[in-house]
Amino acid sequence: MAKYNIVERKEKDASYRMQLRPELVDELYDKILEKLILEKKYRDPDYSARQLAAELGTNSRYVSAVVNLRFQENYSTLVNEFRIREAAYMLVDQRWAGRNVEEIGLAVGFSNRQSFYASFYRMKGITPREYRVQQAEKLKK
């Protein structure tokens, strides 16, 4: 099995995170969830924190700070988690049974096979293809 180059990111010291008003954090948190989950903006491989901030009428530093405070991760990791959750569902959904793994990765917003496989492996501990086979075996039992 191929090994993926997975490196943990160091947390940056950003004092401005603590200077955000709790009301603003709550408001931005709700709006971020609305954009990413309800509108499924995570499916767009080019959708950045900067674009999200512009749509919310704020700046990307505030978006990043809220994501860090509320989700304890960075924007890219959060977006990839939404993508992986949807991909995991699609990999076992019969409506997607005729699609290959790469097509599913593209459908959930990954721009290429490598980033999809690396993110999926990081989150699930197995490749998307292995996940699909494993879940199919569970359904047979």
Image: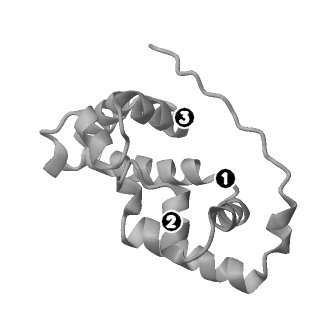
Which residue appears at 70% of the width and 82% of the height? Answer: 24
* Three-letter code for the amino acid on which mark 3 is drawn: Arg
Q: Residues within 10 Å of mark 3 (few under 14, many from 20)?
A: some
* Three-letter code for the amino acid on which mark 1 is drawn: Glu
Q: Is residue 132 above or below residue 1?
A: below
Mark 2: which secondary structure?
helix
Question: Which part of the image, by quadrant, shows the C terminus?
Answer: top left
Residue at label 1?
73
Q: Is residue 29 above or below residue 44?
A: below
Which residue appears at 76% of the width and 82% of the height? Answer: 22
Where residue 112 sits, quadrant-wise, is top left
Q: Which mark is residue 91?
A: none
Q: Residues within 10 Å of mark 1 (few under 14, many from 20)?
A: some
Q: Earlier in the sequence, mark 1 or mark 2?
A: 2
- Which sits in the foreground, 88 or 58? 58
Asked whether the residues under the numbered discs 1 and 2 touch, taking CB atoms below 8 Å apart as contact, a structural biologist would say no
39 on left or right of 55 = left
Tell me the CA gap for discs 1 and 2. Answer: 16 Å
* Residue lying farthest to the bottom in this orientation: 23
Tell me the CA gap for discs 2 and 3. Answer: 25 Å
Tell me the CA gap for discs 1 and 3. Answer: 14 Å
Q: Which mark is residue 52?
A: 2
80 on left or right of 140 = right
